[in-house]
Image (spheres, grey):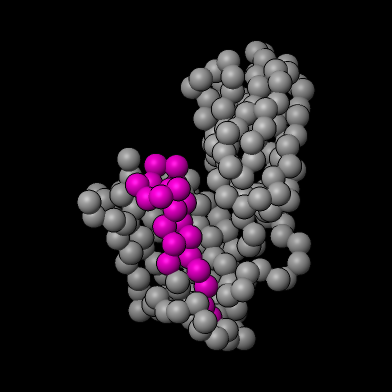
Amino acid sequence: MRGPILILTAFALAVPLAASWAAAPAAVQVQIVDERGMPVRDAVVELVPPGGWRGGAIRFGWKPAMAQKSVAFAPGTLIVAKGSSVAFPNLDSVRHSVYSFSKPARFEIDLYGRDQSRSQNFPITGTVALGCNIHDQMRGYIRVVDTPFAGKTDQNGIVRLSGMAAGGYQLTVWHARARTPGGELKRPLAIGAGQSNQKIALKLK
């Protein structure tokens, strides 16, 4: 079986992670597509610098919250920083629970009603798959990361990450339907100063 296809532009060439950083600021635009070339929405793209992130607290531009609305988790995929406490407000007229059997966070929150909220801490990086005990169709995913350079692709399969120094990184792409171990694709990546562009094809289930 063929694995994921990685297509890199001339400005984003795979190199060992030991590549030295440059001082110039950099940005990278990543597009995730499937085998037919169609955009893949809600893929999580992460860039981790050599030796891990050492720049202090990580804050994203969205709230660490996943609502229960119209008998679904919203958003269906949420990115949070390691150590975050995530709120689960119930906006439905029916009761919900939240549970996970995933290794980074095994927990169960008992049933609670409309306009109530519960929270759970996520101290370990990785993917946490969520469910509701009384609504089997409800599926949600929390991607716990330890880098500020992370984002989720839009309807065009595109995410833009910025603010990093030019240099070597580890690129990780995750999607719930990716045909890779743990839904992850990992590659070393060098990013030049200014804007870099990538296009990555994932084989989906």
Name the residue nearer the viewer: 196 or 85: 85
Name the residue nearer the viewer: 107 or 147: 107
Q: Is residue 129 above or below residue 133?
A: below
Would you say residue 180 is visible in this rendering? yes
Q: Is residue 144 left or right of residue 178?
A: right
Q: Is residue 104 above or below residue 161?
A: above
Q: Is residue 84 above or below residue 88?
A: below
Count of numbered circles on the image: 0
Quadrant for the C terminus, please.
Answer: top left
Identity of the residue drawn at 35% across and 74% down: 9
Query: Which range of residues does the magenta coloring cover?
Result: 167-187
Q: Is residue 2 left or right of residue 46?
A: left
Would you say residue 164 is visible in this rendering? no
Q: Is residue 103 left or right of residue 43?
A: right
The answer to which quarter of the image holds residue 14 is: bottom left
Place of residue 68 in the rendered image (x, y in percent of width and height, measured from the top left): 63, 26
Task: State the residue lying farthest toward the left.
Answer: 1
Q: Is residue 162 above or below residue 102?
A: below
Identity of the residue drawn at 63% across and 69% down: 52
Q: Is residue 146 left or right of residue 9?
A: right
Task: State the residue lying farthest toward the top.
Answer: 94
Identity of the residue drawn at 33% across and 64% down: 6
Place of residue 200 in the rendered image (x, y in percent of width and height, measured from the top left): 36, 60
Q: Is residue 14 magenta?
A: no
Place of residue 183 in the rendered image (x, y in percent of width and height, measured from the top left): 43, 48
Identity of the residue drawn at 31% across and 49% down: 203
Place of residue 132 in the rendered image (x, y in percent of width and height, measured from the top left): 59, 23
Name the residue nearer the viewer: 150 or 19: 19
